[in-house]
Image (cartoon, rainbow, N blue to C red):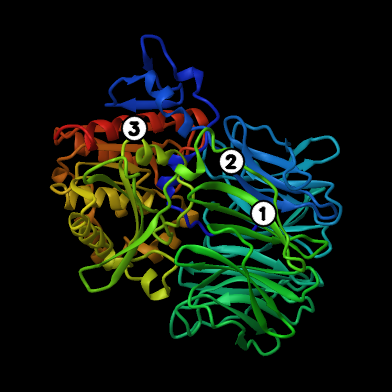
Amino acid sequence: MKKEQRVISLVVVLIMACVCESSQSVLGQGGQIHPGENLVAQGLPPIPTSLAGEVRRYTESRSASLADWHPTERSILISTRFANTAQIHRVRQPGGARTQLTFFDEPINGATYEPKAGRYFLFAKDVGGNEFRQIYRYDAADGRVTLLTDGGRSQNGGIEWSTGGDRIAYGSTRRNGADRDIYVMDPLDPTTDRLVLQVPGGGWQVLDWSPSDRELLIGETISISDSRLWLLDLQTRVQTLLTEPDSESVSYRNAQFSKDGKGLYLTTDKDSEFQRLAYMDLATRKIAVFVDSIPWDVEALDLSPDGRKIALGTNEAGISMLYLFDIASRELQRVDAVPTGAAGGLRWRPTGTELAFTISSARSPSDVYSIDVETGELSRWTESELGGLVATELPEPRLVSWTSFDRREITGFLYEPSSCFSGRRPVMVVIHGGPEGQSRPGFLGRSNYFLNELGVALLLPNVRGSTGYGKTFVTLDNGMKREDSVKDIGVLLDWIAKQPNLDASRIMVMGGSYGGYMTLACATRYSDRIRCAIDIVGISNFNTFLKNTESYRRDLRRAEYGDERDPAMQEFFERIAPLSNAAKIAKPLFVVQGGNDPRVPRSEAEQMVERVAKNGTPVWYLMAKDEGHGFRKKENVDFQFYATVLFVRQHLLGPS
């Protein structure tokens, strides 16, 4: 299961999370919706039961994502949700029925088939959102599930199959909880599990096996803009660095062995602002750029089974494009049959010329498609329900831009309510997480309620630090430049005031994860210019965050934010911390947090809620004891959405 780049705003995902129906456990007597047993709600007013009926059709949609092709049959595994959580289903033909295979309380978002006969597949699952994922085997013959890893407080994943199909290599933090070592195992016999490479740090990942299965290609991520490639000889255990450090930071991604094992196909931003398709000759270590005509990131790469073509997925101003590169002729061809939207999960069918992918758009939740690259025939495998919404009534965004304080252009996507709403419209500014992420024009799901029923515009900015705009742009908020991204939002507020259709007196800022930090920072810096704010699993102080985030991700975060062990950086963090400036928050605040969050610990939310409450400022707090970095379970997402709607009605749309 290759790690997919997260490109959609976390907070939009949280809002649009698909549910089947209102959870009966929270519909109480006396006309109120009560939080479920795993929810802790503080400061929230009563939520009327009538609200569930009013928003129902916005909470019924579902989505589907590609997990894997069957190795010998034309069928696929997908992840989709029918009850409380997403599970693995099998689809035997395009448009065919979805047969559910796994049935767990925790969501399962990916799976990978045994690559020779499909006798079983592997998947990873955590408990309560704690992200300590364990690897399991699902046997197709009888549906039995077997735990393959230690079952403890370790994180396991990044599965790559050997060329022979009899072993997997994967990463695990089991040794000390901080370092992501490399292990090899025969999934049919968990006792064969063995450590093959001990490494320092949490940024290591298996990328591929050599055709001979003698070597592993391994990636080491230092930061979003700095990574390295290593070769591990499994017989001698000799580890060889393939990419020597450069005078500037260079990122290498999507690396795969060529069919003959003599080289690597990869993407890199070496000598470029963007990720380009390239080839490394393993004998000389020289890199030749194959495609430099696309002024955008190549974000996905997959080599065809016969080794003759490479499928490329690009991110062009947030829109995904699919290309085919012929290795022999070096010709690049764009595939025009692909629907417009944001795509991911690019994968060749093992036995043919068919390429599958997942794609979503403003008017369609994510679904799985495939294309025959020889005939050009497009097949749609899933058609996820809109749950009562009408596709043509869902607004499509337009790309907007503004010039920031340093004359740099910043862009975003603006979703506008229909013309039936007159006058200047209130605005929800929704800031993505990461910060190395990007808001893209995907399906909004339940957020369409704010557009269609309340007449609220949604503006999703891609401030400095976002991916998709070149490697210089992504580093513009690093370290001591952290507040520059907050200034981008300040200039956006100026831009909103100049728009004839937007109401600068009714602005709400919201965001998740790093977007939660941005929300809190805006609430302190621009309290006089906004009406309210919603912080979802956000950072309130980088010093306490870096101290308490899980150890396997701490150094990766230091590369982005700065090292709190440096006295100067520590002082800077303390000065800019929303927690330190909480007295400036004079507008209502809603804080949402997962109790088991390993990334942004619960303490970040609780210390902020306590400090803001001392101001006498209205503050709502919602915590789920069975969730992690955002809510994923139906009953919890239901209640979060009801509370969000009520908060928007009272504090964004209500009287001053």
- Front position in the image: 394 or 642: 394
Tag 1's secondary structure?
strand
Q: What residue is shown at x 34% (from left), y 40% (from top)?
A: 603
Residue 630 coordinates in the image, percent (x, y) = 45, 41
Residue 88 coordinates in the image, percent (x, y) = 68, 41
Q: Is residue 597 visible?
A: no
How far apart are the alpha carbons under marks 2 and 3?
A: 30 Å
Pointer 3 local density, CA inside 10 Å: few below 14, some 14–19, many at least 20: some
Residue 53 coordinates in the image, percent (x, y) = 43, 22
Determine whether label 1 and label 2 are within 8 Å by CB: no
Relative to 30, residue 119 above or below? below
- Residue assigned mark 3: 645
- Residue assigned mark 2: 126
How far apart are the alpha carbons under marks 1 and 2?
A: 28 Å
Q: Residue 369 carries which label?
A: 1
Residue 496 coordinates in the image, percent (x, y) = 22, 55
Tag 3's secondary structure?
helix
Q: What residue type is labelled 2?
A: Asp
Q: Answer with the quarter of the image where residue 1 lies.
A: bottom right
